[in-house]
Image (cartoon, grey):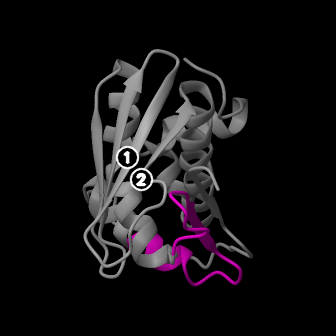
């Protein structure tokens, strides 16, 4: 299975929870993922490198990925190498995104007994960016559902525009 990452909010509802809007992005993501994980059917999916799917949780593993997502998107858009560290206990892998023209090479290095097979995958720049923007947009929609005031917080405000216009469009 090729590299894939996605979030499905399940049966998410507004429970009246509010968040401290003075928190930094990473703190908000950690708290949000804990709340989003409570929704029936909520699922964070990461596949690739011979593992379909990886054992992922919404509350912890998704927050680890999303903490790094703004930097990953920025590096992809500027054509720079990026190393995403999935440091969650039990996962403990590094994904290295190496741009190469219209596509990228993603290399997976495991710090556990699991051996990625294959250790390297190639994906088109456009499809990867579309996938990551959809993940961001779906997460921002979930955040807005939980607490509508989050729609005005960066980067959620930008990510919501991707939900409104389609995550596959470049800006």
Assess disc 1: are there few (<14), some (14-19) or many (≥20) residues with their C-alpha within 10 Å of its C-alpha.
some
Q: Which mark is residue 28?
A: none
The residue pinned by badge 2 equals 119
- Image quadrant where residue 171 sits: top right
Secondary structure of the residue carrying tag 1 is strand
Residue drawn at x 50%, y 55% as measured from the top left? 149
| Vertical placement of residue 130 versus 143, above or below | above
Where is residue 150? Give x, y as percent: 48, 54
* Quarter of the image that includes the N terminus: bottom right
Q: Which callout, 1 or 2, points at the residue further toward the start of the chain?
A: 1
Residue drawn at x 46%, y 30% as measured from the top left? 104
Asked if residue 29 is among those painted magenta in the image, a careful observer would answer no
- Image quadrant where residue 60 sits: bottom left
Q: Which residues are magenta?
A: 31-54
Assess disc 2: are there few (<14), some (14-19) or many (≥20) residues with their C-alpha within 10 Å of its C-alpha.
some
Asked if the residue at tag 2 contacts the one at tag 1, i.e. Cβ–Cβ closer than 8 Å, the answer is yes
The residue pinned by badge 1 equals 107
Q: Nearer the viewer, mark 1 or mark 2?
A: 2
Front-lying residue, 155 or 37? 37
């Amino acid at each position: 299975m090729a590299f894939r990452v996605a979030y499905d909010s399940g049966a998410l509802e507004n429970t009246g929870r509010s968040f401290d809007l003075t928190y930094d992005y990473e703190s908000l993501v950690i708290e949000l993922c804990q709340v989003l994980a409570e929704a029936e059917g909520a699922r964070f999916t990461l596949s690739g490198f011979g593992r379909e799917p990886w054992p992922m949780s919404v509350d912890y593993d998704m927050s680890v990925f999303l903490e790094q997502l703004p930097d990953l998107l920025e590096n992809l858009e500027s054509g720079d190498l990026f190393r995403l560290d999935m440091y969650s206990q039990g996962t403990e892998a590094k994904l290295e995104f190496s741009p190469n023209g219209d596509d990228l090479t993603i290399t997976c290095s495991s710090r556990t007994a699991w051996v990625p097979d294959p250790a390297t995958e190639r994906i088109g720049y456009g499809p990867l960016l579309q996938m990551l923007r959809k993940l961001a947009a779906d997460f921002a929609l979930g955040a807005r559902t939980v607490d509508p005031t989050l729609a005005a917080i960066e980067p959620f405000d930008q990510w919501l525009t991707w939900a409104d216009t389609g995550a596959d469009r470049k800006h």
